[in-house]
Image: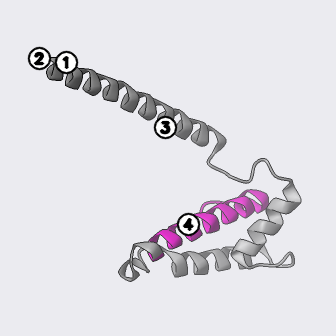
């Protein structure tokens, strides 16, 4: 009988811990979505622009059309489906790289009002 009570206590405690973790995760995701998921918001504008230019491989003299072209090239090159056959490590690396490319282009899209992706 004592074992049964102990097992029930552990199950109930585990349920409440798991529930707490899920609530915290949802709150974090909500806060990220409120911020727009944009990781560059707290940095100075010049540093953001330079970092985005480095990610996309463009210079300050490049036109918005060149930025869009480079974005599409990089997105096609690093898309996770392109490296799926190479293994999970390469796929995870490609996902991170793709996310960085998309965030950098989003910065320029807003700056130059480039319209939809």
Counting other residues with Cα less than 10 Å from the Cα at mark 1, is it few (<14), some (14-19), or many (20 or more)?
few
Q: Position of residue 52 (x, y in %)?
A: 75, 67
Rounded to the nearest whole Å, what is the CA distance between mark 3 and mark 1?
Answer: 30 Å
The residue lying at 26 percent from left, 27 percent from top is 11
In this view of the protein, which residue sits in the foreground, 9 or 17? 9
> Vertically, is 75 above or below 109?
below
- Say whether residue 64 is visible: no
Estimate the x, y position of residue 109 in percent, counting from the top left: 70, 61
Q: Does the residue at mark 4 contact the one at mark 3 (Cβ under 8 Å)? A: no
The mark that comes first in sequence, 4 or 3, is 3
Q: Residues within 10 Å of mark 3 (few under 14, many from 20)?
A: few
Q: Choose mark 3 or mark 1, whichever is in front.
A: 1
Q: Quadrant of residue 9?
A: top left
Q: Is 34 contained in the magenta span?
A: no
In three-dimensional space, the C-alpha distance between marks 4 and 3, rounded to whole angstroms, equals: 20 Å
Distance of label 1 from label 2 (alpha carbons)? 6 Å
| Local SS, label 3 | helix
For the residue pair 116 and 106, the one nearer the viewer reads as: 106
Question: Which segment is the magenta one?
Answer: 90-117
Q: Residues within 10 Å of mark 2 (few under 14, many from 20)?
A: few
Q: Which mark is residue 25?
A: 3
Q: Earlier in the sequence, mark 1 or mark 4?
A: 1
Query: Left or right: where does residue 85 sit relative to residue 25?
Result: left
Q: Quadrant of the C terminus?
A: bottom right
Lower position in the chain sequence, tag 2 or tag 4: 2
**46 left or right, relative to 73:** right
What is the x, y in percent for residue 88?
40, 72
Query: Which residue is depicted at the point 73% across and 56% down?
Result: 110
Residue plotted at (73% across, 79% down)? 57
Q: Please say if the residues under marks 1 and 2 sit with CB atoms less than 8 Å apart.
A: yes
Q: CA distance from mark 2 to mark 4?
A: 52 Å
Q: What residue is drawn where x is 69% and y is 64%?
A: 104
């Amino acid at each position: 009988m004592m074992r049964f009570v102990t097992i029930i206590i552990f199950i109930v405690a585990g349920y409440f811990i798991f529930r707490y973790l899920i609530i915290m995760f949802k709150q974090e995701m909500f806060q990220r979505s409120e911020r727009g998921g944009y990781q560059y918001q707290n940095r100075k504008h010049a540093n953001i622009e330079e970092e985005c230019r480095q990610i996309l491989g463009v210079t300050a003299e490049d036109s918005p059309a060149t930025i869009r072209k480079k974005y599409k090239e990089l997105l096609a090159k690093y898309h996770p489906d392109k490296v799926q056959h190479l293994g999970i490590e390469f796929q995870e690396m490609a996902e991170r790289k793709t996310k960085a490319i998309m965030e950098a282009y989003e910065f320029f899209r807003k700056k130059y009002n480039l319209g939809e992706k």
